[in-house]
Amino acid sequence: MSDRPPCDCGCANIFGAREAQDDLKRYRRDGAASTTKALIEAIVAEGIQGATLLDIGGGIGAIAFELLAAGAVRAESVDATEAYTTVSHEEAERRGLGERFTGRVGDFVALAPEIEPADVVTLDKVVCCYADMPALVERAAERARRMIGLVFPRETWWNRVAARVLDAWSWLTRDPVRWRLHRPADIDRVLAGAGFERHDVSRDLIWHVVLYRRSAGTS
Ligand SMILES: C[S@@+](CC[C@H](N)C(=O)[O-])C[C@H]1O[C@@H](n2cnc3c(N)ncnc32)[C@H](O)[C@@H]1O
C-alpha cells in the first residue's frame, strides 16, 4: 500500500466498505459485469499465458482474478478507493493467490513512476471518474507493453443527460464526484499518439469496450 492519499476524484465518497462488499458478493454470485466479461474475453483471446497485468481502478479485482485463472502470471491493482483494495486483498487471499496479486491504494497518475510496466493494462470504467484523462491514459499507455483495455462511456445524448443530472446532485451535496464523459475521439488520439491501434470489442447502451494493441515497432 502507498502512504499517499488517494486522488481527489471523489470515488472514496461513493465506494465505501458496503459497496465493496456488495460488489464482491455480486461477482461471486454472477461473475463479472457483462462489459468486464467482454473485455476479459478479448484479452484472453490475444493469448495471456505468462503475461503480467496492471489493473488501474481495479475495484474488487474481477479482471485480475479472471486473468490469473486464465494463465496470467501476476496482477497488480492500483485503486484510489481503500475499501476496494481491502476487499480485493481478502478475496485474493481466499483464492490462495499469494504474491501473484498485489493491490495498492492511490492515484495511479501520482504513483505511475513507481509502478512496473505490464504486458496488459486495463481501465474498466475508470477514465469516467478522472478529470485529467490525458494524464491518466498516457501514463497507463507508458506502462503497457502489449495492450491496453478500456471500458468508457459512449458519446450519446442520454449519457450526457445522465452526467448533467449526476453533476447537479454532486453540486447540491458538495461532493467532488463527477461522471466525466471524455470524448472517445480524444481517448483514441492519446492512445494513437502512444503507439496503440484501436480494436472495438463491443458496446451496450452506456459503454464502449475497446482493446488497443501496441502497433508493431513501437515500445
Ligand atoms: C466505477 S469504479 C470501477 C471499478 C472496477 N474497475 C469495476 O469495473 O468494477 C472506478 C474505480 O476507479 C478508481 N479510480 C478512479 N480514478 C483513479 C485513479 N486516478 N487512480 C486509481 N484509481 C482510480 C476508483 O477508486 C474506483 O474504484
Image: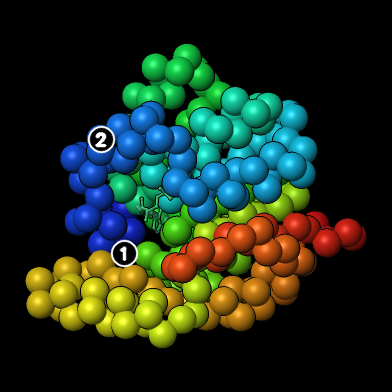
Whether residue 25 is visible, yes or no, is yes
Q: Earlier in the sequence, mark 1 or mark 2?
A: 1
- Which residue shows up at 74% across the image and 30% down it? 49
In the rendered image, residue 115, in percent from the top left (x then y), is placed at 55, 45
Image-based side of 126 in relation to 39, left or right: left
- Is residue 37 shown above or below 66? below
- Mark 1: is the Cβ under 8 angstroms from ligand 1? yes
Residue ID for mark 1? 9
Lateral position of residue 5 relative to residue 155, left or right: left
Quadrant assignment, res 51: top right
Q: Which residue is mark 2?
A: 21
Q: Secondary structure at mark 1?
A: loop
Q: Is mark 2 within 8 Å of ligand 1?
A: no
- Separation of disc 1 and disc 2 at Cα? 21 Å
Say which of 30 and 121 sits in front. Answer: 30
Q: Callout 1, which amino acid? A: Cys
Which numbered tag is attached to residue 169?
none
Q: Quadrant of residue 168?
A: bottom left
Work out whether residue 197 or residue 156 is closer to the camera in this orientation and state it. 156
The three-letter amino acid code for the residue at tag 2 is Gln
